[in-house]
Amino acid sequence: MHLLDLITRKRDGGRITPDEWRAFAAGYAAGRYPDYQVSALLMAVFFRGMDADEGFALMQGMLESGGRLDFKGLGKPVIDKHSTGGVGDKTSIPLAPLLATLGVAVPMMSGRGLGHTGGTLDKLEAIPGFNTRLSLAEAKAQVERLGCALIGQTGEIAPADKKLYALRDATATVEAIPLIAASIMSKKLAEGLTGLVLDVKTGSGSFMPEFDRATQLAQTMVAIGERCGCPTVALMTSMHHPLGVACGNALEIEESLDILHGGGPADTREVTVALGAEMLVLGRLAPNHGEARRQLESAIADGSALEMFRRIVEAQGGDPRVVDDPRGVLPQAPRQSVVTAPRAGAVQTVAPRVIGRGIIALGGGRLTMEDTVDPAVGFHILVRPGQGVTRGQPLAVIYARDDAGIDAGKACLASAITIGDEDFVPPPLVSHRVTAAGVEEYGDG
Amino acid sequence: MHLLDLITRKRDGGRITPDEWRAFAAGYAAGRYPDYQVSALLMAVFFRGMDADEGFALMQGMLESGGRLDFKGLGKPVIDKHSTGGVGDKTSIPLAPLLATLGVAVPMMSGRGLGHTGGTLDKLEAIPGFNTRLSLAEAKAQVERLGCALIGQTGEIAPADKKLYALRDATATVEAIPLIAASIMSKKLAEGLTGLVLDVKTGSGSFMPEFDRATQLAQTMVAIGERCGCPTVALMTSMHHPLGVACGNALEIEESLDILHGGGPADTREVTVALGAEMLVLGRLAPNHGEARRQLESAIADGSALEMFRRIVEAQGGDPRVVDDPRGVLPQAPRQSVVTAPRAGAVQTVAPRVIGRGIIALGGGRLTMEDTVDPAVGFHILVRPGQGVTRGQPLAVIYARDDAGIDAGKACLASAITIGDEDFVPPPLVSHRVTAAGVEEYGDG
């Protein structure tokens, strides 16, 4: 197979066959094609797209380039949740122990923060000692024993995707829906799942802000999952503002624990429970979403999910006292500052990208994968778009390492949180549900 | 300047500024940008195009990345001719001595054959001893002394273009008009010209078969030349069939000498004289094309052009006896075979791409720049599209190294030359003339 022929054909609007896409993924992982040809192919795909068979075959080739988890014979549904990423999105952390408690095996493979978007691995590593670098064999053993493991993408999983993603990132070819879908699904389907729930963010703070494109991405991923025999559902959720109150690694662990203690902000709780209900229904552990929600509330109320979280932290080398005394165990920022409303009015924006960049300015995020993160810093965001505020009312708290951080945090909040006179109703938190049957407005049933 | 920003902007239909294009060319020549990013940028340009200012700035940046010839103070017009390439196109060879004889300085920089297209350097090197690898300083000295040098693109000229062209060739990004125009013009304008004549081929055997696109390329190049203060004219000439009779390196030298001796095929002669007349008029050595044609015919008739060719061959180390005894000096193919018409009728096609690939099959052309060429092999094509033939009439002669070559030649000719019952008039040999003023139908005046 000559890669130049494939580039020319795709450039001219032709089709690359499924066999060719699989051979491409295998050959690229094996180092047979130079990056300069592959990036030209990727840019041609950006302009010409791929049909469903092409995207599926690329996904298959990337999946088959690496190792896979296998839970056959476990006798439990094996279900993961994946989010396309945002600011303040910590739902993976309470979801994993909740679902494990309720009889779902959860091999949760997460990423690190990059740019304005946070990452679950960075949040977990705010817990002293917590080790996310498990091998596939270690993760499998822990899932079999406890029902859950919280790990990063090891080099064993989809190496072709790992290489291709790095190249896309350097060549402005990330934003092609078939490539995004193939990348995400090649990693998720390597987990040996019997079901997958996708949290596809829309709104200004999401990876793909346009609702139509985000929905198309959700549909593409759902179709790939179903075609692989892995029932897949996506919820379209709002990233018009950060999710919850806490934004920053240690602060988000604390909020996750609040959820497991039965408290926490209503929006974080609602997205967590909505996604968890989908997971339970996919796993046939609940007959409908109402019953699933009741199971989730009860696993919180009786403390079993919290107890499961303690066991996971312990199993992965973290300090289990974090569960009862988060502030005593998690790193604390030495400087805090409350920012108040300069005028009365209605909150117009709490811009998630600006908040995300503010966390980077405080030292708590990454511009490149080589940056290290300060787990203690971040924000508590106390208001939501549409909310009325009085002059002097607290809008947010900055958690910083030093005075320079406080100044950076103030500059960020002044630009992110705007107050005006327009009343408005913010878009719903969970707006749509995407399944193999199509796109429907979200309802609790 | 971050190349990723430029890729993203071009991808999204934005504009790269002239300063950025110049910095890109300089930086790429200096090894500052990885090929995998540059190929993504090139593919984005393929889809989004470049405006005239962008293309001009890229051309400038590539031109300025290397050395240039300077003929200031020579007191003569300095004019070159460039062809976009085809099969049997040997006009450079008689043109160079003709124009030098008539008072034009001709620093003729040519290329090698690749794919179905032949190259002037390969043809010249069929003359034993002929050295095309002159440095810029040597070429300049020879042009000043003799009025002409026939050389290859040295590493000194437009190194950014050399690197970029190799990358385009490997990534299916050759066929973008602004990139082609910038590439050709960066090399030609490095020759220190006071005028440039372009031979832009159209038809199935040309690099760009569609007439409209080829005309657009011609207009783009003419605009670049004029903007650099180098008056530029393009003729649109036919590559619906090979030019002349001889196709193959040594055979084409022989036909070139026939032209200088006052003979040769009518079509080779007509294209040579048409291009030469443009060069003389551009150099203000003739007041109009009619007078220019008379000067050219007279330089052939009185033997002065032939004498000039002898001196050029001698100056560049070649065996000057080639001028009077080409068959005694040029390498001869040991095997020949005449192919005749299998039926009576009208010649429908003499497909130049098929003939060009036939020359490669005989060993006389290149698939990659690393291939060596056999100068002796090739074809004499005795018929033209539209011509009536009787059964058994000779169509072509194959010149081959061995029996396998004869068989390959026969297979090629059987596919290239088709005979049918339809009468038709082939398109004109020189169809249009492109100047800064626009595109006009070609006439002799």
Image (cartoon, coloured by chain):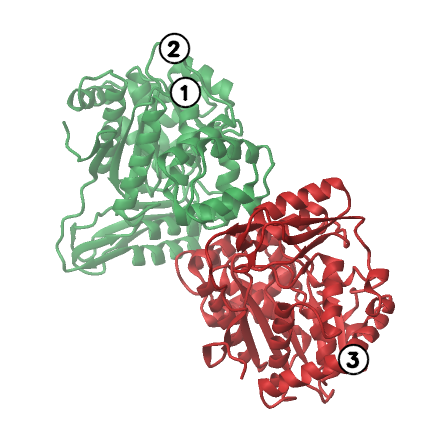
Chain colours: A green, B red
Q: Which image quadrant is residue A217 in? A: top left
Please, what secondary structure does the residue beneath circle 1 have?
loop
Tell me, yes or no, if residue B320 can be seen here: yes
Q: Residue placed at 40% from the left, 35% from the top?
A: A55
Task: State whether residue B131 is above or below residue B41.
Answer: below
Mark 1: few/some/many CA within 10 Å (<14, 14-19, 20+):
some
Q: Earlier in the sequence, mark 1 or mark 2?
A: 2
**Label 3 chain ID:** B
Q: Residue B346 got which mark?
A: none
At label 1, which amino acid type do we have?
Gly
Which residue is at the front of the view, A289 or B428?
Answer: B428
Task: State whether residue A145 is above or below residue B243.
Answer: above
Please, what secondary structure does the residue beneath circle 2 have?
loop
Q: CA distance from mark 3 to mark 2?
A: 95 Å
Instruction: Find the residue positioned furthest to the left.
Output: A423
Q: CA distance from mark 3 to mark 1?
A: 84 Å
Which residue is at the front of the view, A260 or B141?
Answer: B141
Residue underneath mark 2: A74
Q: Specify whether disc 3 shares its chain with disc 2.
A: no
At label 3, which amino acid type do we have?
Gly
Residue underneath mark 1: A192
Q: Are marks 3 and 1 in contact (CB under 8 Å)?
A: no
Q: Are marks 1 and 2 in contact (CB under 8 Å)?
A: no
Q: In the drawing, does residue A30 fall left or right of residue B9?
A: right
Please, what secondary structure does the residue beneath circle 3 have?
loop
